[in-house]
Image (cartoon, rainbow, N blue to C red):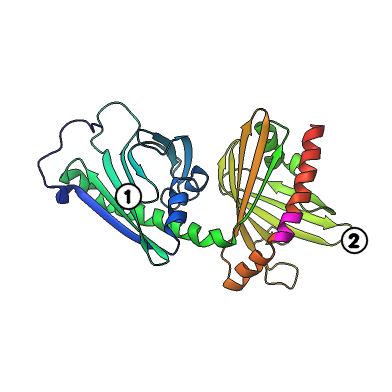
Amino acid sequence: MSTGKPVSPETTADRELVITRVFSAPRELVWKVWTDPAHVVRWWGPRGHSTTIREHDVRPGGVWRYVMHGPNGVDYDNRIRYKEVVAPERLVYHHDADRDDDDDHSFDVTVTFHTRGEQTEVVMRTLFRSAAVRDQIAQFATDGANSTFERLGELLADLPVEFVITRSFDAPRELVYRAFTEAERLAQWWGPRGFTMRVQQLDLRPGGTCHYSLRATDGREMWARFTYLEIDPPGRVVFINAFADAAGNAPVRPPFPDPWPSEILNTMTLTEKDGKTTVTLRGVPHNATAVERATFLAGHSSLQGGFGSAFDELAAHLARS
């Protein structure tokens, strides 16, 4: 695959940037998180950025197109064209700005995955068009890669305690998305059976919050707050759910004695096929101690029951809509 006009005569070493990172996870898992789009959107890009995938085909000749959303509100189009895919050992691809004109800042990447005992060493070699281009963006590229790899390491650490629940609903994706993002609809199903939700305030935007209460039949009331991190309608919402007080301050300690995490980072994705929508919710403790993470892991069965009953209510709400 041609990368455009010939490169300048510098040596490969002059044009190359090499970054190495070791992750505490087996190679097969690192490969899966690197190549599965459901995981990729959770870590790809420097901290503060998010990714929307337009096309994702990891095979020789396949193309991955995505948009990187910067914290400054600017969107960046990207295209990766795969040359080699050898699972779980090696990826070789060409990266550009997803346009047909010549791109001086396009580059070639080789990523290799090496087993190091119970860990995995990842080596990313980036070959730029010229030494001048490498020198121009080396610091930016290094900082971006290090931040991205930090996010990958955090995700790999979270996966052993991650709670995942999936449910299919007989309703279009837009309606299911509205049921989660509109206060009047959300109040009709969110929370375990036996609790009534009251939405105090909902501000659906990155950085916005949803402050709400859950009241039990015996009058007990708990307050909580969503903080929205990413909004990609109608397919994805990332938010932190934290215990709060009646004034909306969060996080506060949970209102029960077990060392439960005060904050849970949730990623909700919605996919539609043949008029039905599949919702997948992934939750991991946020800013939690080792004891709190262990308590969360031990509580997966309780979470399954709580979200299962909530999704039953969601199905009933959708049937009425």
Q: State how far apart marks 2 and 1 are (Cα).
A: 57 Å
If the image is split into quadrants, where does the C terminus sit? top right
Left or right of residue 152, residue 13 in this image: left
Q: Which residues are magenta?
A: 301-305
Q: Is residue 185 above or below residue 228?
A: above
If the image is split into quadrants, where does the N terminus sit? top left
State which quadrant residue 288 falls in: bottom right
Residue 112 visible in image: yes
Q: Are marks 2 and 1 in contact (CB under 8 Å)?
A: no
Q: Pointer 1: what residue?
A: 111
- Residue type marked 2: Asp
Viewer-proximal residue among 72 and 234: 234
**Mark 2 or 1, which is nearer the eye?**
1
Whole-percent x and y of residue 89?
A: 36, 51
Q: Is residue 270 above or below residue 212?
A: above
Q: Pointer 2: what residue?
A: 218
Whole-percent x and y of residue 245?
A: 72, 62
Left or right of residue 140, residue 286 in this image: right
Query: Residue at position x 72%, y 55% from top?
Result: 304
- Residue type marked 1: Val
Determine the residue located farthest toward the right in the rendered image: 218
Query: Residue at position x 47%, y 47% from top?
Result: 40
Whole-percent x and y of residue 238?
A: 58, 48
Viewer-proximal residue among 65 and 304: 304
Left or right of residue 47, residue 131 in this image: left
Determine the residue located farthest toward the left in the rendered image: 9
- Classify 10 Å Cα crowding around label 2: few (below 14), some (14-19), many (20 and above): few
Whole-percent x and y of residue 269?
A: 60, 42
